[in-house]
Image (cartoon, rainbow, N blue to C red):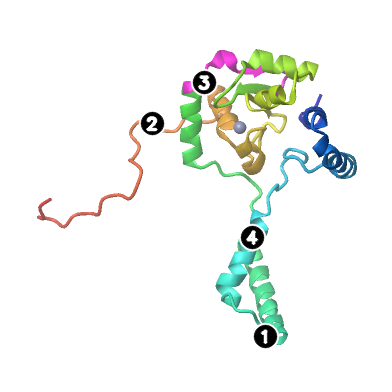
């Protein structure tokens, strides 16, 4: 079963449990019916993980909107004619910018993530990291409410006693898929889904020695602004 299939099955199983929970409250009948028709039958691919490695937020659009206000319109409402002139200038600027700074095609793993991943592999109990097949792994979440063995049993049987049990299960472990071999690697944690890299994917690669372990662990600079360089011969 591919990770995408697993996600779809889990989504529908969770939705079924949620509808069962709503069915106990007759005030929710109408909404439950609407939800089921609209968001399960007609438009069912809205859940996080429905399309892997594609943007799942409109952050890019919001950022562009911000840049238009900050650098071009200066937050003024413009009449149509000046706005069209400005729009032409924006298009020219962005076209030139796209040539000078092409779209990034590879993932850059920053040092901060490396350090957090190293911290995670030192804290996690490695017996809790399970391998499901050649590329698929399960790791415990930060605050698991069941162990990864029970988690995998629920995943295979797709049976949960209630929607609450399903929610506990969902938050207890993360599933990773290494079929890409190199980053971006899929992880079902919220950072993995949005940023295509997380402490789990990098951490496992550190355990396998395919990702270097960051240097100077324990000797990192403290957080916050550094002290100003003092004048020579000045006193504290
Ligand atoms: Zn993750």
Q: Residue at x 62, y 70 (%)?
A: 68
Instruction: Give 97 or 6, whichever is nearer the viewer.
Output: 6
According to the image, label 4 marks what residue? 62
* Nearest to N terminus: mark 1 or mark 4: 4
The numbered disc on residue 64 is: none
Q: Quadrant of residue 160?
A: top right
**Is residue 128 inside the magenta stretch?**
yes
Q: Give the residue number, with chain letter if any, for mark 1.
A: 82
| In contact (CB < 8 Å): disc 3 and disc 2 | no
For the residues labelled 1 and 3, the Cα–Cα distance comes to: 59 Å
Question: Real-space Cα distance between discs 2 and 1?
Answer: 55 Å
Q: Which residue is mark 3?
A: 124
> From the Cβ of disc 4, is ligand 1 less than 8 Å away?
no
Residue depicted at x 72% and y 40%: 48
Give the mark nearest the N terminus, 3 or 2: 3
Q: Label 3 vs label 2: CA separation?
A: 17 Å
Given this view, does label 3 or label 2 mark the residue nearer the observer?
A: 3
Circle 1 crowding by C-alpha within 10 Å: few under 14, some 14–19, many from 20: few
Position of 112 with respect to 106 (left or right) is left
Q: Quadrant of the N terminus?
A: top right
Q: Nearer the viewer, mark 4 or mark 2?
A: 4
* Disc 3, SS: loop
Foreground pick, 133 / 209: 133
Q: CA distance from mark 1 to mark 4?
A: 23 Å
Q: Secondary structure at mark 4?
A: helix
């Amino acid at each position: 079963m591919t990770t995408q299939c697993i996600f779809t099955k889990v989504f529908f199983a969770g939705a079924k449990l949620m509808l069962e929970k709503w069915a106990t409250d007759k005030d929710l009948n109408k909404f439950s019916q609407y939800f089921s028709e609209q968001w399960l039958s007609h438009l069912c691919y809205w859940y996080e993980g429905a399309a892997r490695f594609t943007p799942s937020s409109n952050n890019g659009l919001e950022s562009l909107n911000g840049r238009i206000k900050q650098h071009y319109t200066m937050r003024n409402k413009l009449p149509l004619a000046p706005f069209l002139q400005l729009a032409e200038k924006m298009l020219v600027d962005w076209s030139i910018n796209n040539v000078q700074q092409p779209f990034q095609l590879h993932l850059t793993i920053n040092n901060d993530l490396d350090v957090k991943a190293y911290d995670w592999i030192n804290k996690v109990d490695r017996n809790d990291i399970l391998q499901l097949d050649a590329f698929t792994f399960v790791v415990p979440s930060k605050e698991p409410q069941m162990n990864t063995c029970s988690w995998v049993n629920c995943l295979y049987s797709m049976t949960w006693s209630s929607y609450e049990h399903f929610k506990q299960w969902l938050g207890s472990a993360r599933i990773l898929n290494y079929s890409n071999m190199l980053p971006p690697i899929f992880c079902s944690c919220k950072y993995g889904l949005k940023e295509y890299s997380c402490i789990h994917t990098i951490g496992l690669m550190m355990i396998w020695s395919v990702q270097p372990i960051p240097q100077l662990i324990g000797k990192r600079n403290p957080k916050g602004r550094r002290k100003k360089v003092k004048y020579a011969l000045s006193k504290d």
